[in-house]
């Protein structure tokens, strides 16, 4: 299978996060849970940061969380984001464990109406970039 | 802060080296916007000036510290530039950023062990030239990190202005920090640069009104919250405090140094105290080693890629409580001449030059010698807070009596 992708699309075949992107393609937000201590471990690591355990099971999350912080980009730093501008990269704290913060983007909402700690939920949408071939489904968020 | 709150990082175990090492020579290249110069030329110019400042010859330098980034001066490059061929001790733990503050610790070990007697630390960039040619810049190194590449960049959480604006906004939420307080930092550093002829922004003034009137580029950041992109570099020479007494310049000694790390590395999204820096771990080590209190500090400099970094490092280094940085920096607090804590007296990365902190150390040394352009009266103790994100270091320098 051809796995090379064009920047800034993710390499969905890269082993440590393959399950994350496979989940997104199946409209599931999957995060690894440590088999030893039972805590979510994000970003994926070879050994659990909390307990040093080695086994992980990827688990589907509810897709609910709260808005931890965000910004509104009005100047695209990368030309590939030109057609998206203005856009709101955000960190979402997951309902299952708020210490896990997902880097994502707030979409389909009034960017001026975003508020700290507001409830949000996942929506799976294709990442499409200016002058970049291909697309990848990603977990983006909307106000809940 | 409770013990649990400190689970997110650690301090390196440093022996007390207070008073052992002196910085005996400093130099900086010309700093500029895109100049067409190469990194090698820039670093070479800074080193020539540091040698002249110290009254040393290239053959006197028997130790070299640098960071293994493109075109930095390693031993082979040193010999090629100066036409020398002598043996040199070499360390890749040098350069700017955190390393500009921590390098004197590694140097102290080499001096103790007799591996070297005069150690040079250098750093330089030609990022302004390279960016104009689309060949390099600060975003590029971060884009190589695979988790960023595959989990952050696709979402648009990239590059540095985006993630640190996210930090700044969270700081505003947690501690009611205001846009004007961030602006106070940008305005104060510009004023310091206006008194520093070598600063890239020497001629360009900035008022609070101008700052607030500017559009945001990544809200809450305006352009003036973000560092310059520059061509430039610096160098400093270290030797034993004993030997420095017989040299040309007023002796400036390393009073204290500390180094701290976060467990989450460059993955800031996962750092539990999102609005803190590892200065929380580094600064207490350096202050203890130096045996000083915050009231003893005459000037502070820190790695300041964005306004929020000065605010956070002032808090995390203990100059005010966590969350009170906004109120602390208001008014003339950071001004070189009238400030309560003159900070980034040459203008910092925001208004002097984005040479990643090496020029901050040069500035502190000049201040303590009484040779700075924007001179703090009677400065005896000065600090450089180095930072790279996953790491921070505090270097306390003292004018020797």
Image: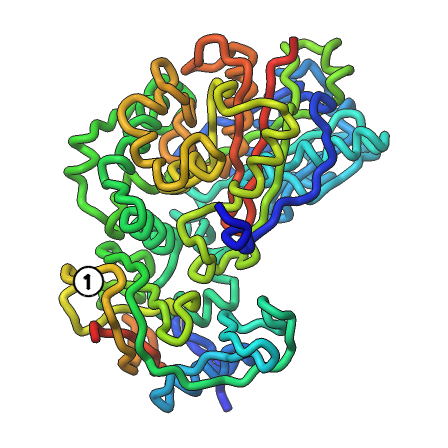
The relative height of residue B314 versus residue B170 in the rendered view (above or below) is above
Residue at (27, 35) in percent of width and height? B181
Residue at (42, 61) in percent of width and height? B269
Q: Nearer the viewer, residue A52 or B332?
A: A52
Crowding near the residue tagged with mark 1, few <14, some 14–19, many ≥20 C-alpha atoms within 10 Å: some
Tell me the element at label 1: loop
Give the percent coordinates (x, y) of residue B97.
Answer: 54, 40
For the question of whether residue B36 can be seen, the reply is no
Residue A30 horizontal side relative to residue A37, left or right: left
For the question of whether residue B101 can be seen, the reply is yes
Give the percent coordinates (x, y) of residue A39.
Answer: 52, 75
Q: Quadrant of the C terminus of chain B?
A: top right
Give the percent coordinates (x, y) of residue B247.
Answer: 71, 11
Residue B68 horizontal side relative to residue B31, left or right: right
Q: Nearer the viewer, residue B162 or B18?
A: B18
Residue B322 horizontal side relative to residue B264, left or right: left
Residue B192 horizontal side relative to residue B396, left or right: left
Q: Residue A46 sits in which quadrant?
A: bottom right
> Label 1: chain?
A
């Amino acid at each position: 299978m051809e796995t090379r992708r064009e920047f800034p699309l993710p390499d969905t075949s890269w082993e440590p996060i393959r399950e994350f992107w496979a989940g997104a393609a199946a409209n599931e937000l999957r995060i690894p849970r440590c088999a030893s201590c039972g805590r979510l471990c994000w970003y994926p690591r070879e050994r659990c940061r909390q307990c040093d355990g080695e086994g992980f099971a990827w688990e589907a999350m509810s897709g609910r969380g709260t808005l931890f912080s965000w910004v509104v980009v009005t100047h695209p730093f990368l030309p590939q984001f030109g057609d998206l501008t203005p856009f709101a990269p955000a960190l979402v704290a997951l309902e299952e464990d708020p210490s896990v913060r997902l880097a994502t983007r707030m979409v389909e909402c009034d960017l001026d109406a975003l508020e700290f700690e507001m409830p949000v939920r996942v929506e799976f949408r294709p990442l499409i970039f200016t002058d970049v071939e291909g697309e990848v489904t990603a977990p983006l968020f909307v106000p809940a | 802060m409770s013990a649990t709150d400190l689970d997110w990082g650690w301090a390196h175990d440093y022996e007390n080296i207070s008073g052992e090492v002196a910085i005996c020579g400093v130099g900086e290249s010309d700093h500029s916007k895109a100049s067409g110069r190469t990194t090698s030329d820039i670093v070479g110019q800074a080193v020539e000036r540091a040698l002249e400042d110290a009254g040393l010859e290239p053959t006197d330098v028997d130790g070299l510290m640098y960071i293994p980034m493109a075109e930095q001066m390693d031993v082979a490059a040193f010999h090629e530039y100066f036409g020398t061929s002598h043996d040199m001790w070499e360390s890749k733990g040098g350069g700017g950023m955190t390393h500009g503050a921590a390098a004197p610790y590694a140097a102290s070990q080499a001096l103790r062990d007799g591996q070297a007697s005069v150690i040079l630390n250098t750093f330089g960039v030609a990022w302004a030239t390279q960016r104009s040619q689309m060949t390099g810049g600060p975003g590029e190194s971060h884009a190589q990190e695979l988790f960023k590449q595959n989990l952050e960049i696709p979402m648009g959480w990239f590059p540095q202005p985006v993630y640190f604006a996210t930090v700044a906004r969270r700081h505003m939420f947690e501690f009611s920090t205001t846009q004007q307080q961030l602006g106070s930092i940008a305005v104060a550093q510009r004023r310091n640069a206006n008194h520093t002829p070598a600063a890239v922004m020497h001629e360009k003034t900035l008022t609070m009104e101008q700052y607030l009137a500017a559009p945001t580029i990544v809200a809450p950041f305006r352009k003036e919250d973000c560092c310059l992109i520059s061509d430039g570099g610096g160098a400093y020479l270290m030797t034993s405090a004993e030997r420095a007494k017989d040299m040309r310049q007023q002796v400036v000694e390393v009073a204290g140094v500390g180094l701290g790390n976060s467990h989450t590395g460059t993955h800031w999204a996962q750092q539990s105290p999102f609005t803190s820096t590892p200065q929380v771990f580094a600064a207490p080590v350096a202050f203890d080693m130096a045996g000083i209190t915050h009231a003893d500090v005459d000037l502070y400099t820190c790695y300041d890629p964005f306004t929020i970094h000065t605010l956070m490092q002032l808090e995390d280094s203990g100059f005010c409580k966590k969350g009170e940085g906004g109120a602390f920096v208001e008014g003339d607090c950071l001004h070189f001449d009238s400030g309560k804590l003159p900070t980034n007296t040459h203008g910092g990365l925001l208004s002097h030059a984005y040479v990643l902190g090496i020029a901050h150390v040069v500035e502190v040394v000049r201040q303590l010698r009484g040779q700075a352009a924007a001179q703090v009266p009677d400065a005896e103790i000065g600090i450089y807070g180095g930072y790279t994100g996953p790491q921070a270091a505090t270097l306390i320098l003292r004018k020797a009596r």
